[in-house]
Amino acid sequence: MEPELDVDPGRDDLPLRANTNHILVRHYALDLSVLLQEQLIRGSVVLFLEPCPAGAGAEATVKVGATGDSETVAETGETSGTGSVNPPSDLVSTAKKGTTQLSQTNSCWENASQGDFTLVLDCCDLVVLKVEEVDVSSVPDMSRLLEAVGPEGSAPCTDSQPAVLVQRLIALPSHQWRRQLHLYSQCSQAPAYQGGRPLLFHTDRWSLQVRKRGAGSPQGFPRALRVSYETKPEGGSVRWTRDQDHRMCVYTAGSLINNRALFPCQEPAVAMSTWQARVQAPQDCTVLLSGENQALPTPNQKTGFSSWEYYVTMPMPASTFTLAVGHWLQATPDLSIEGERRGQEEDRAGSGAGSGALAVQAGSREPSTPTDMHSPVTTCPHSTFNYSGLEDESPSVTDCPGLGDENIPCSHGDYPCRFADPSAWRQWVVPHRVFAPPSLLPKARKVLLPLLPRCLAAAHGTLGVHPFPRIDLLIVPAGFSSLGMARQKGPANERLLCMPAPGLKAQECPALS
């Protein structure tokens, strides 16, 4: 690849460096700690990889040119043992711990490949500390994947045992999604692989490149990698700012460089993946993330941090991953306003003038006091999926390909799809929550909470089944530089960040200005 010139993401096409024609990331497992005062996110991401069929891409060895920026070439030496994030109390500047720095140029990196395959990930403004192969065979529950005949598409028997295990984990059918998620979580905490040759990695402005000596093809490359890293305050994927109450917060802002300054990933749209994330943040903060589950915090009194865990089972581009951490509270309905509105809806429904679906799906009526995530309140309790437990299920009508109530076929890959679930077609209003700084809770309660069920019901009436089982809305400070947030309409001081599971939709909210 020819050297890149200076690229302006606001003017030029975003460089797509990931070699997705050779190998794909099928699942991300993130373990992050958010340090608001330091404006830093530190942790790791475990990548579960699947090589493309032999012959699908060009030659296996991929060369990536220089960008003219500084770069790092390192050979991993130490292993972290568990691979998990250090407790927040131990989060100090670690520089390049665990790596041996080599003074090499981009040309030296290319010339030193010796025919080894190179995994290329899209990456920008990240300090990569270590890259290591995860020993998935050390997870006891993974051995059960070898007991039965592998599913269609599982790795050939000529592969190594870790490769077979990861391939069969990726290929588990959708009715075993709980088991799959459990195994992903266990593998993400497994130690680094002790045998074999070490991994080499190299970073430039737009990419992270990883090699294993002796692995000359994607089929011979490790299937589970852990990348330990930390973000930079100037990274464009997240915005560090103060909320409307002048308290520090951070959120993904729909950046022009997507999420490559938040974690190493594959940007091309062909790279569809699921993810799970454990995020540690100060105990007085709320963590919202694009996830199908409604996460509750697990406090750690020793560190003063709480841990939040989210996941998605619907494969999506990495650019749709959203994260927000701040001192926000959940807005709950005002009893007097909600009672009056509900009475009007019932009157209209009884006279035949209103929508019966709106009256049926009005949702629960909770106390009007604001809450935090330690006592969550959902304004609409109807939920299609029950995510408790890890037991396997028998195949059902929700397994795709299948047909929903509207006889619309699903032709995508196998995952727990709502379009094939009859109950989802009858769910006009999905569970939803609204979060805001304390000073904006009255406005959020008065304006958004009565409006949101109507909007969701109207969307269902026009477009059909909601693709996501729940939705969170967050009022964040103005200042977006892209998407709908770039337009200023009058003296707007707030914007609405909508975080459905698992996507992102950003739009202006002039009603709150």
Image (cartoon, helix red, strand yellow):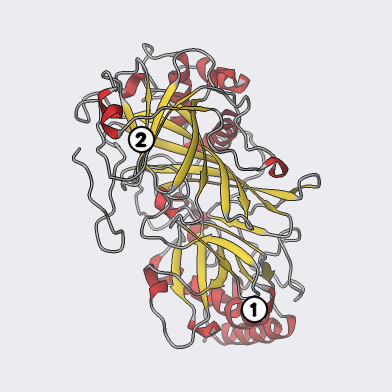
Task: Using the rendered image of the protein, determine whether residue 167 is visible from the camera's viewpoint.
Answer: yes
Q: Residue furthest front?
A: 103
Mark closer to the chain start, 1 or 2: 2
**Mark 2 crowdedness (10 Å alpha carbons): few <14, some 14-19, many ≥20:** many
Who's the residue at 46% across and 41% down the image?
Answer: 399
Q: Is residue 504 above or below residue 274?
A: below
**Is 134 on the left-hand or right-hand side of 439?**
left
The circle on residue 440 is 1
Task: Using the rendered image of the protein, determine whether residue 426 is visible from the camera's viewpoint.
Answer: no
Where residue 257 appears, x then y in whole percent?
A: 37, 55
Who's the residue at 46% across and 38% down the image?
Answer: 27
Q: Is residue 60 above or below residue 439?
A: above
Where residue 106 appears, x then y in whole percent?
A: 29, 34
**Is 259 on the left-hand or right-hand side of 287?**
left
Location of the N terminus by quadrant is top left
Residues 336 and 503: in front is: 503
Where residue 162 appears, x then y in whole percent?
A: 47, 18
Q: Which residue is mark 2?
A: 24
Q: SS for tag 2? A: strand
Pointers 1 and 2 in contact (CB under 8 A)?
Answer: no
The circle on residue 429 is none
Residues 286 and 37: in front is: 37
Q: Which kind of residue does numbered mark 1 sit on?
A: Leu
Q: Which kind of residue does numbered mark 2 sit on?
A: Leu
Where residue 10 appears, x then y in whole percent?
A: 30, 63
